[in-house]
Each structure stands twice: as C-alpha cells, then as structure tokens.
C-alpha cells in the first residue's frame, strides 16, 4: 500500500518552513482507495515568492486547521504505507519536522518518483514534475497546488509501476508487509483479488516471485490455484504468502507481459510455460507454374513464417476459412491432395488455378492480400486495444515488423505523436513467442485497431 502525497510550504529557512497545504492519496497499486486534502494554518507568514508560485496567501489560511488538528488523520491514512512523493526527501523531512514539534516520531518507508523516473525512464530532458508528466502525456491541472501535484504523482507512479519490469517496487513492498507473512490466509488473498483481466504474481514471504500467470478473471484463477488438488497446486499453496496483480484491460497486453516476465524472472513454478507455445506455422512458396502455394508445416525458426499456430489442426482450420474468405484453391493451400482439379473446381466454386485456368497474377493477388493481413513483417504500426480504465487505451508498438514494447495512454492524447509514444512504451523483447501471440490475437480479434506510424 502506498501513500502518495504532495506538500506546499511557507518557504523560508531550512527546517523552519511550515505546511500550508497537504494532499495524500492512498493507492493500492491500481486505484486510489482513500484521500486526505486540506489547507493548513502554518502559524507563520508565507514567503512572497511562494504566494506567487502557489496562489496560497496568508488570508486563505486564517481559518484553516493547524497541523496538530490534522496530524491524527495523517498518521491514520499513512499507516502501513510506503510514502511516495516527487522529491520524497523534501516532503518526508517537512512531515517529520512538523511531527517532531508535536513530540511524535513519524517514521515511514519512502519512495521518490524522481529517482524511480531516472532509473525507469532515462534520457528525459527534465525530471521536474511538470515537465516530466507533460513529456509522458500525463494530464496535469493545478500545478504547484498539493492536489494537482499529488494527482499527477499518482498517475506518474502508476506508469512507473508498469515500466518496472523487474517488479522491484512491488516485491520490496511485499517484503516490508509483515502482517501477511505471519499466517497466510488464502481466503483473504482471494477476497482482495479483482475479477479483471491482467497478470498476477505469487510471492513467498521474502517477496520473491514464485509463479506468474495471466487471466481474464484474476479472482477466479487465484481461487483455482488455492483449491486445486494436483501436486503443483498443493506446492503453490504451501509457499505463497501474497499475490499481487497488474491490471492490463487488454488480453493481448496480459499475454505479452506474462510471456516476457516468465522468460526473464524464471519463477520456479512456471517451468512448463517456458516451452514453445506453438508447434506449426504457415509458409508460402511458388510452384513451377508461378502460383503461390500455402502450406501448414512444423514450425522451423530457420524459415520465414507468415503466421504460427498452437497445433496442426488450428492451422488447417485457419486455411479452411481463408479458402472461403479469399476464394483460394484447395489444392494450392494443401487441403485437397490431387493431381488434377480440386473439389471446389468440380462444383464450380474455384476459378481454376489448380488446372491453370486462372492466371497466376490474378490468383496470387488474393494470396498476397491474405499474407499481408496475417503478417506484420516490415510494418510500422501501433495496435490499439483496451486500457485499464474507461478513458485509457493500450498501445503495442511494431517497428519494421519488430515488436518494440507496450504502454498505456490517455484518450486526450494523440498516440501518433512519436515523442509521447516513445515515452509511454515499456521496451520488451521481440521473439517467436511474441510474434505468435500478436498474430494469433489479431486473427481472433478482427476489429482491433491498427494505426500506421511514420
């Protein structure tokens, strides 16, 4: 659990500043579940340059509560939380100083989004909150007011969690949570899980990831893990003390994240999923008469495949549909073995490529349309799919036929803006598995939007 905050102060000498406004958002890693926002009477004058910067003046704070009046609420909303702030050292120092004046030792773990941004989003021209969030396409209002800056920090932290592919932030948080380490109660873990699409991570008491999975209903899948009676489920039940998750909205994003992170983290209970997820592929070749033939064959990394399949049967099923959709010849796609005409020609549903009646150029044009639609080789595009919220979409970037990574963007921003696009994308590995995942998903989801990128 995180307490994301921003504090405005009077300015002045070091450790003599007073708080003028505070905003705290309690964030569970996915959404804000509690908040506290208040002006504060600092019982001292505000520096003129601060008045010009924030718009908060001495008259506004005369009737505002003093710090001791809001201290209890601050303690409650930040209890068992990691404090998160942009330049956390400053905000934490100011809070600790105010509590020290009351004779109370305020101690919390803290995370700085400046330091996290430098590690996870290197190469930015500036890491000041305003310039950074604008470069990332994050909408921000009420700059230099606690509420506006804290909300911007929440959105930035959400993006940083997504970019933290090593899951160091989440794993550290699990390790620092002693309550769930003492007596793991699976029923409580299940109760905390949402019925959404995403990737879930099963941790041991040290925060180490034991298992990574993907589901369109995380709660249901976790319940299956904890109620399973097979050998693997029983092992998981004895080791797991916490489950965290990452909402994706899009099943495609979940599939890609699961594949990437299993390969990188290599959790002990994911061994079975490290094998190839496809066995067959679609290949093309020209015969002696100049016709493009299609063939389902065992997947071979040395050959350039059009698309891949989980098994031979799914490949044949795909070809059967394409014969109908593109009016192709059964013989030339390998579905009807004959030395003469195919069955569809006999019933007058084939234009006669199998017996040389249809010109190769005309037939091949339809085959090339099929190949173009089912392969993203040499293409530059962004695949747009569902996001985690109503006003958000996911973006999967393909450059020159290579999967580059994925991210999320707000509907208020044009995803064709190359600078914004590069900032939000979390780089990921391109391999045969990711190609299979993307091609299979596009085959099954015909209405997915693909935008060309210059």
Image (cartoon, helix red, strand yellow):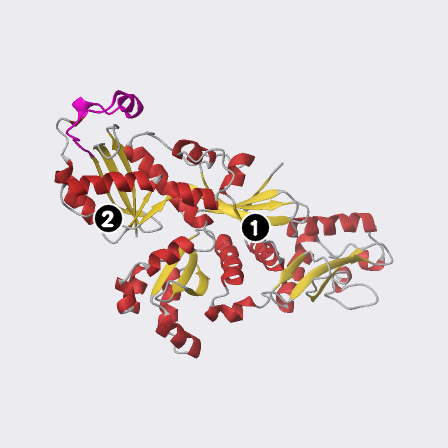
Determine whether the residue tagged by mark 1 lies in a helix, strand or loop: loop
Please say whether residue 284 is visible from this viewpoint.
Answer: yes
Q: Residue at x 34, y 59 (%)?
A: 174
Magenta-span inclusion, residue 58: yes
Between tags 1 and 2, which lies in front? 2
Magenta-span inclusion, residue 313: no
What segment carries the magenta color?
39-60
Q: Residue at x 49, y 52 (%)?
A: 253
Give the image quarter of residue 42.
top left
Q: Residue at x 60, y 43 (%)?
A: 381
Horizontal side of 209 relative to 14 (left or right) equals right
Q: Which residue is mark 1?
A: 446
Closer to the camera in the image, 270 or 130? 130
Q: Which residue is mark 2?
A: 78
Horizontal side of 90 relative to 135 (left or right) equals left
Q: Position of residue 185 (x, y in %)?
A: 28, 69
Q: CA distance from mark 1 to mark 2?
A: 46 Å
Crowd rating for badge 1 (residues with CA inside 10 Å; few <14, some 14–19, many 20+): few
Q: Position of residue 309 (x, y in %)?
A: 62, 63
Closer to the camera in the image, 323 or 444? 444
Q: Closer to the N terminus: mark 1 or mark 2?
A: 2
Q: Position of residue 79 (x, y in %)?
A: 22, 51
208 shown above or below 424: below
Specify the farthest residue to the right.
288
Q: Residue at x 35, y 50 (%)?
A: 30
Determine whether the residue tagged by mark 2 lies in a helix, strand or loop: helix
Q: Position of residue 318 (x, y in %)?
A: 64, 60
């Amino acid at each position: 659990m995180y307490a994301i905050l921003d504090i405005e102060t009077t300015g002045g000498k070091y450790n003599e500043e007073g708080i003028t406004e505070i905003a705290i958002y309690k964030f569970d890693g996915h959404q804000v579940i509690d908040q506290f926002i208040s002006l504060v009477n600092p019982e001292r004058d505000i520096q003129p340059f601060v008045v010009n910067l924030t718009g908060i003046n001495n008259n506004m704070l005369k009737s505002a509560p003093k710090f001791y009046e809001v201290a209890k609420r601050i303690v409650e909303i930040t209890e068992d939380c990691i404090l998160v702030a942009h330049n956390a050292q400053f905000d934490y120092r100011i809070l600790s100083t105010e509590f020290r004046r009351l004779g109370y030792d305020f101690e919390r773990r803290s995370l700085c989004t400046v330091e996290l941004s430098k590690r996870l989003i290197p190469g930015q021209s500036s890491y000041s909150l305003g310039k950074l969030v604008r470069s990332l396409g994050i909408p921000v209002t009420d700059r230099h007011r606690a509420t506006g800056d804290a909300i911007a920090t929440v959105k930035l932290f959400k993006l940083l969690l997504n970019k933290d592919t090593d899951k160091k932030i989440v794993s550290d948080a699990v390790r620092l949570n002693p309550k769930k380490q003492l007596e793991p109660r699976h029923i409580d873990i299940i109760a905390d899980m949402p019925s959404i699409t995403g990737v879930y991570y099963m941790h041991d008491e040290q925060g180490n990831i034991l298992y990574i999975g993907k589901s369109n209903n995380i709660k249901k899948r976790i319940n299956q893990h904890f109620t399973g009676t097979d050998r693997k489920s029983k092992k998981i039940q004895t080791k797991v003390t916490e489950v965290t998750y990452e909402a994706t909205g899009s099943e495609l994003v979940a599939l890609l994240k699961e594949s990437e992170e299993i390969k990188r983290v290599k959790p002990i209970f994911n061994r079975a999923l490290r094998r190839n997820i496809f066995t067959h592929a679609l290949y093309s070749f020209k015969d002696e008469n100049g016709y493009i033939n299609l063939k389902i064959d065992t997947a071979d990394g040395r050959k350039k495949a059009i698309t891949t399949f989980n098994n031979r049967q799914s490949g044949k099923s795909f070809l059967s549909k394409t014969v109908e959709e593109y009016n192709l010849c059964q013989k030339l796609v390998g579905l009807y073995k004959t030395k003469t005409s195919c069955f569809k020609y006999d019933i007058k549903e084939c234009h006669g490529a199998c017996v040389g009646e249809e010109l190769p150029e005309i037939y091949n044009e339809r085959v090339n349309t099929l190949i173009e639609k089912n392969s993203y080789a040499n293409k530059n595009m962004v695949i747009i799919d569902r996001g985690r919220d109503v006003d958000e979409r996911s973006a999967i970037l393909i450059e020159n036929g290579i999967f580059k990574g994925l991210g999320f963007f707000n509907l208020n921003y044009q995803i064709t803006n190359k600078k914004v696009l590069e900032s939000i994308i979390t780089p990921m590995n391109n391999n045969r598995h990711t190609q299979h995942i993307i091609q299979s998903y596009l085959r099954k989801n015909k209405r997915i939007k693909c935008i060309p990128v210059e």
